[in-house]
Amino acid sequence: MQVSSAYRFVQCLLLGLSLTLLNACSAELNNSDGEAQSAAAASSSAASSRSRMPNDPSLKALYIQSCYGCHSSGAAGAPRSGNTEQWAPRMLKGLDTLLVNTKNGLNSMPPRGMCMNCSDDDYRALILFLSGEAE
C-alpha cells in the first residue's frame, strides 16, 4: 500500500511541531548552565532554519510549498535548511546524486520532494539553498 505525498507531508509537519514542542519543554526543564546553553543553541539553530528563506521570490514559493515543512524543523530526519554540518556529507555525494535522490525520494522524503512541477534547475537551486551553499 502506497502512502500519498500529502499524507507524508502532514506526517512531517506534525513530527516537526512535536519536536519543536519537545525541544521547548526540555529547555525549560534543564537546570544546569551547560544543559541550558546547549538547549538554547539548539533552539537558536532551529529558529534560524525556520526563518531562513530564499531571496528569489519564485524559489521562495517553491521552498515554502515543498521543502519548508520538513527541512525547517528537521522532521523525520530531514537535514535542516542552512545547516552546513548536516548537509556536508550529502553534498560530498555531488549535486547530480542529490538531484536523483530528490526526484526518486529517499528515506522519509517522498518522490519529487513534494514539488511535482519542479524542473531539474528548480531542484538544483533548492538543494543549493537548503545546503547553505546559496541564498
Image (cartoon, rainbow, N blue to C red):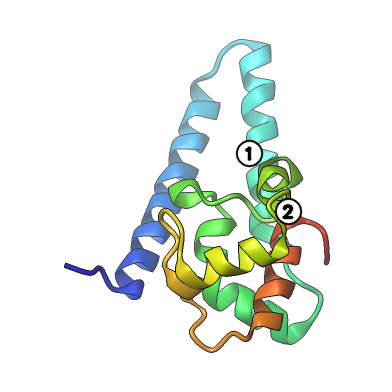
Q: Position of residue 113 (x, y in %)?
A: 50, 70
Residue 125, above or below 8 = below
Q: Which residue: 67% across, 13% down?
A: 33
Image-based side of 89 in relation to 10, left or right: right
Q: Earlier in the sequence, mark 1 or mark 2?
A: 1
| Label drawn at residue 43 | 1
Q: Position of residue 99 (x, y in %)?
A: 62, 69
Residue 102, above or below 31 = below
> Whole-Å distance between the Cαs marked 1 and 2?
14 Å
Image-based side of 107 in relation to 130, left or right: left
Secondary structure found at label 1: helix
Q: Which residue: 22% across, 69% down?
A: 2
Q: Which residue: 72% across, 56% down?
A: 131
| Tag 2 residue | 82
Q: Position of residue 88 (x, y in %)?
A: 73, 45
Marks 1 and 2 in Cβ contact (< 8 Å): no
Residue 95, above or below 46 = below
Secondary structure found at label 2: loop
User: Label 2 neighbourhood size at 10 Å, few (<14), some (14-19), many (20+)?
Assistant: many
Q: Position of residue 20 (x, y in %)?
A: 49, 45
